[in-house]
Image (cartoon, grey):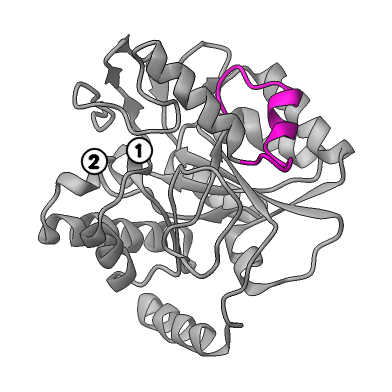
Amino acid sequence: MRRHALDLVDRAAALLAPPPRSSPVVCLGFHAVDAVPSDISLHPNRFAALMRRLRDDGFHGVSVREWESGASVPGRPIILTFDDGFRSVRSEALPVMAEYGFHATVFPITAGIAKRADWRTARGPFPPMEMLSEADLRELVRAGWEVGSHGVRHVFLPALGRPELETEARASREALEDIVGERVSTFAYPYGAFSADAVRAVREAGYRTAWTTRPGRLDTTRPLLLSRHVVPPRATVTTLRAMFGRGLATVYSVAGGIDRLRGRRPRYSAYDERTDCSTFV
């Protein structure tokens, strides 16, 4: 009954929504905020310094839903997102962001809720990291955050067939809606990787927006292929400011070229086939 009511509200919102438009807003993507180093963790002190700088530079955080609706916000709007759903988002990021007047959108993996990530990359295992619980997600919503989906299992979507893609998109959305009691209308592609079939599955599951890890400003004519700047673990205030300059994508393009010269995959690309970021215990 609740999901049927949400469906009706969502259809009405789609009819009343303003047409797509270009947007100067930038989206930043984070993962974990943790003192234990990893490829996806920012140290809490570094994260706090970045949030302080954003506040001092006049930025105001908006959720994906607020941005999509065209809601008026003071200052310079910015979208902040957290992929995967690590518990450190609640324990470390939430209080810091509340202190500086920000909220965000979190994209949990539904198979990982209330579990521990047991992940591995080509460079070795990640440190064990606890995931958000259902109660944590509801607490974030009460604090003004939005919940989106990151799929059921955090798998490489271009390798899946259509039935599996439908499950990843639809089942994760339904599970999250049951947990938080509100419409889940935005999706983040695991590893930032997508295909035509993946985009189709996301659209047919009813999502209004979906996010890649390609850097750049938001092109609202392609709402299911929106750009994000993934903030690297050693990001500084200088790194962050470069994301808002005239050479918005140049910083990452150059960094990707350096990675390739060093024999690494570009830092904003998906991990290779030796990566397993779908195991939870």
Please say if 12 is above or below 103.
below
Say if 19 sits above or below 209 in the image.
below
Mark 1 Cα shell of 10 Å, populated few (<14), some (14-19), many (≥20): many
Q: Residue visible at 36% across and 82% down?
A: 4
Magenta segment, prevailing SS (helix, strand or loop): loop
Q: Quadrant of the C terminus?
A: top left
According to the image, label 2 marks what residue?
Answer: 156
Q: Tell me which segment is drawn in magenta.
A: 231-248
Give how far across and how far down residue 120 sits, in percent: 28, 18
Residue at left 74%, top 46%? 102
Whether residue 191 is visible: yes
Q: Which is more N-terminal, label 1 or label 2?
A: 2
Q: Left of 62 or right of it: where is 58?
A: right
Question: Closest to the observer: 133 or 194?
Answer: 194
Q: Amino acid at mark 2?
A: Phe
The residue beneath circle 1 is: 191
| Side of 133 where 205 appears, left or right | left
Q: Residues within 10 Å of mark 2 (few under 14, many from 20)?
A: many
Q: Please identify the quadrant where the N terminus is shown.
A: bottom left
Estimate the x, y position of residue 253 in percent, counting from the top left: 52, 32
| Rendered view: 156 above or below 105 | above
Which residue is at a point 47% across and 44% down the rendered structure image? Answer: 214
| Residue type, label 1 | Tyr
